[in-house]
Image (spheres, helix red, strand yellow):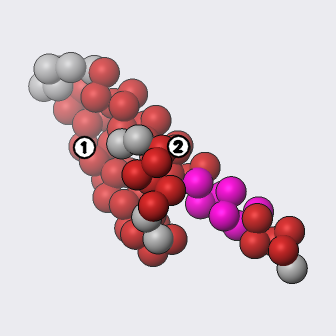
Amino acid sequence: MKIVEIRQMSDAELKQRIVSEEETLGQLKFRLASKQLESPVKVRLVRRGIAKMKTVLRERVKSSELKK
């Protein structure tokens, strides 16, 4: 997911998406450990996507704190 798409999401959508992506990451890690994952790169991509979403949320929190 591109950062532009992430920035267009609302806070509620981002939080919901983070939860679902973290569940997906857990499943991928389990499949990786049991040698059922065909491409370990998927774990890295999901982890980076979660990091991007958390970064955008944190930026929004920080900017709202500065405005107060």
Question: Quick one: 25 or 10, which is closer to the camera?
Answer: 10
Q: Amino acid at mark 1?
A: Gln
Q: Quadrant of residue 63?
A: bottom right
- The image shows residue 68 at horizontal and vertical percentages of 86, 79
**The magenta stretch spans which residues?**
56-62
Cα–Cα span, label 2 and label 1: 17 Å
Q: Which residue is mark 2?
A: 51
Q: Quadrant of residue 44?
A: top left
Label placed on residue 5: none
Disc 1 is placed on an element classified as: helix
Magenta span includes 3? no
Q: Is residue 46 above or below residue 37?
A: below
Mark 1 is surrounded, within 10 Å at the Cα level, by few (under 14), some (14 to 19) or many (20 or more) other residues, namely some
Q: Quadrant of residue 60?
A: bottom right
Q: Which residue is mark 1?
A: 27
Of the two numbered discs 2 and 1 in the rendering, the one whose residue sits closer to the viewer:
2
Overall secondary structure of the magenta stretch? helix
